[in-house]
């Protein structure tokens, strides 16, 4: 990233402390054409899928449920230090009863809602 300092570690806790809104990922660095993002979530997101990419969720703090249709294995529960990859094209709905902090890795430009029209804007911090 153009404004990233060379040879500097990215402190995810510091980045997460810079915002309070939910369901609005922040890009903290890039890796081989992918955004490395942090996000805070609470409540439920919309049901969606991604036509061109898998969806990686890594929980840093809290508990997350990834709701999926029974035919695709049913719900997945994640706690701190756990990750799950939703395969490309699989319908899913992230849900958090209490606030969750996560890291996401997606190809740059991937709409978080699966649809450009309803996606959160890309914000770099």
Image: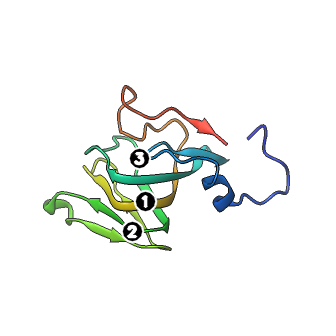
Image mark count: 3
Mark 2 crowd level (few <14, some 14–19, many ≥20, 10 Å Cα): some
Tag 1 secondary structure:
strand
Q: Indicate which disc residue 32 carries.
A: none
Q: Secondary structure at mark 3?
A: loop
**Quadrant including the N terminus:** top right
Q: Of label 3 and label 2, which has the lower sequence position? A: 3
Query: Can you tell which mark lies on residue 63?
Result: 2
Assess whether mark 3 and mark 1 are in contact (beta carbons under 8 angstroms). no
Q: Position of residue 48 (x, y in %)?
A: 28, 43
Q: Quadrant of residue 56?
A: bottom left
Which of pointers 2 and 1 indicates the residue nearer the eye?
Answer: 1
Q: Quadrant of the C terminus?
A: top right
Query: What residue is shown at x 45% (from left), y 72% (from top)?
Result: 82
Whether residue 50 is visible: yes
Sequence order check: which comes first, mark 2 or mark 1? 2
Q: Colour scheme of this structure image?
A: rainbow
Q: Are marks 3 and 2 in contact (CB under 8 Å)?
A: no
Which residue was labeled with disc 1? 99
Q: Position of residue 105 (x, y in %)?
A: 53, 53
Q: Could you give the CA–CA distance between mark 1 and mark 3, rounded to whole angstroms?
A: 26 Å
Label 2: which secondary element: loop
Query: Would residue 31 be seen by someone viewing this image from the given angle?
Result: no
Residue 78 location, quadrant = bottom left
């Amino acid at each position: 990233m153009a404004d990233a300092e060379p040879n500097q570690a990215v402190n995810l806790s510091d980045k997460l402390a810079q915002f309070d809104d939910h369901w609005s990922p922040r890009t903290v660095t890039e890796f081989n054409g992918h955004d490395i993002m942090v996000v805070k979530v609470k409540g439920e997101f919309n049901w969606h899928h991604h036509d061109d990419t898998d969806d990686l969720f890594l929980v840093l703090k809290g508990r997350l449920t990834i709701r999926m249709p029974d035919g695709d294995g049913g719900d997945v529960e994640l706690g701190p230090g756990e990750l799950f990859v939703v395969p490309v094209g699989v319908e899913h709905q992230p849900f958090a009863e209490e606030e969750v902090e996560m890291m996401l890795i997606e190809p740059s430009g991937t709409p978080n809602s699966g649809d450009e029209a309803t996606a959160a804007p890309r914000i770099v911090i």
